[in-house]
Image (cartoon, helix red, strand yellow):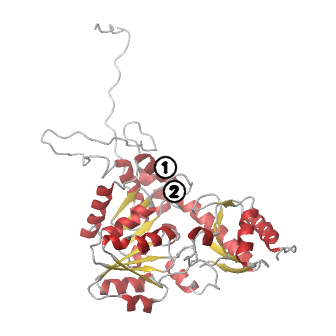
Amino acid sequence: MARTPKNPSQKPAPKKAPAKKAKPAASGWSKRTLTAQAMGGIDEETRGVVRPIHVATTFIRDPDNTYSSGFIYGRPDNETVRETERVIAMWEDAKAAMLFSSGMSAATCVFLALKPGDHVIVPKVMYWSLRNWLKNDASHWGLAVEFVDLTDVAAVKAAIRKGETKLIWAETPSNPLWSLSDLTAIADIAHKAGARLAVDSTCATPVFSQPLTLGADIVMHAATKSMNGHSDVVAGALATAKDDEFWQRIAATRKNLGAILGPFEAFLLMRGLRTLDLRVRAASANAMELAKRFTEHPSVAEVLYPGLPSHPQYALAKKQMKGGFGHMLSIRVKGGEASAIATAASVELWKRATSLGGVESLVEHRASIEGPDTPCPPDLLRLSAGIEDVDDLYADLDQALRRATGRSNRAK
């Protein structure tokens, strides 16, 4: 096929200068700053301020049959995933982080990295899906699971089985009762017993709490929630204090089960992380204001929120959660289960939906979702405060509560 003749008047295209790599972050920049710029990463070819999505699933071998790029196949590894993992590791002051296809896959991979016969201690009040898996399926993998009140340090210590206990799993604040576990004390108990402490810190978020700095070995997040913040990505994350043999077993489990997050989802998660600090602080300020107002509401029997001085573990919350107490709270409605369900049915601005941590505010009657063996009181509504105007959020739930409980006078 003949080539098109060159235009003699056309000048040859100038050679591209070699792409400059992004400079390392200056010492002292805050996590909020680094996250807003995705650690300062740019597209080195186009100089774009947003890095591209790496979708390749297979990679060229070197002539000597090795992989100098560090990438072999898309199931165990991906560059877009790596970039997002670096941001999460930075937030958690972690040695390394891993992303998973969901919060459940992240959590279960920790347990599956244990060995048959290992004894694990888990909370009585915790994320419902993981509780069900531990109760019904973990034994098939040879794990001995014991449910303990992790708000009681003495009970945790008493549950230790010498030579057998290999993991304590904590969730703090616990969903949906918002009780806390003393992570420093429990980490000490775990380590003296030769066990590890893993912490589900989804609701605390890394903005307000970094469990690894309190002695935990692994921290887990359902990244679907606050880390993403837009209710459009399902993802999970783990971060570790040590890149040790146990961490490598978790990595192998992720690889073997195909539980890695996809590159497009990782890209969306990075987009959400860029505004993590702003969103979480705004939503948490709303939660605090709502907790204060509903404490005085005539239709509310009790407000569960660790940021209230009336919370039994308020002192511990102040110690473990720096700068805020999270965007999650629960209210117990006067009139019982029927009034609670009627309240959720009467909202207009709040959305009746599962999940939490998005920019929109959600309300849910948890007992009817979780079933007959739930630890959740039947009169409880779980609230995930978003970033809307707090006066609008209060007014909407106020009218729903009054309609459900037959109260006409406005709260003071």
The image quarter containing residue 114 is bottom left
Q: Is residue 16 left or right of residue 372?
A: left
Look at the picture and state if 351 lies above or below 193.
above
Identify the mark at residue 360; answer none if there is no mark: none
Identify the mark at residue 228; answer none if there is no mark: 2
Residue visible at 46% across and 44% down in the picture: 50
Q: Is residue 57 left or right of residue 314?
A: left
Percent x, y of residue 320: 49, 79
Look at the picture and state if 106 lies above or below 74.
below
SS class, disc 2:
loop
The image quarter containing residue 407 is bottom right
Percent x, y of residue 272: 52, 54
Identify the mark at residue 268; answer none if there is no mark: 1
Q: Nearer the viewer, residue 377 or 200?
A: 377
Q: Quadrant of the C terminus?
A: bottom right
Q: Quadrant of the N terminus?
A: top left
Q: Residues within 10 Å of mark 2 (few under 14, many from 20)?
A: many
SS class, disc 1:
helix
The reply to whether residue 19 is in sight is yes
Residue visible at 34% across and 83% down in the picture: 190
Residue visible at 48% across and 55% down in the picture: 234
Q: Is residue 391 left or right of residue 56?
A: right
Q: Amino acid at mark 2?
A: Asn
Q: Amino acid at mark 1?
A: Leu
Q: CA distance from mark 1 to mark 2?
A: 7 Å
Residue visible at 57% across and 77% down in the picture: 178
The image quarter containing residue 107 is bottom left
Marks 1 and 2 in Cβ contact (< 8 Å) = yes
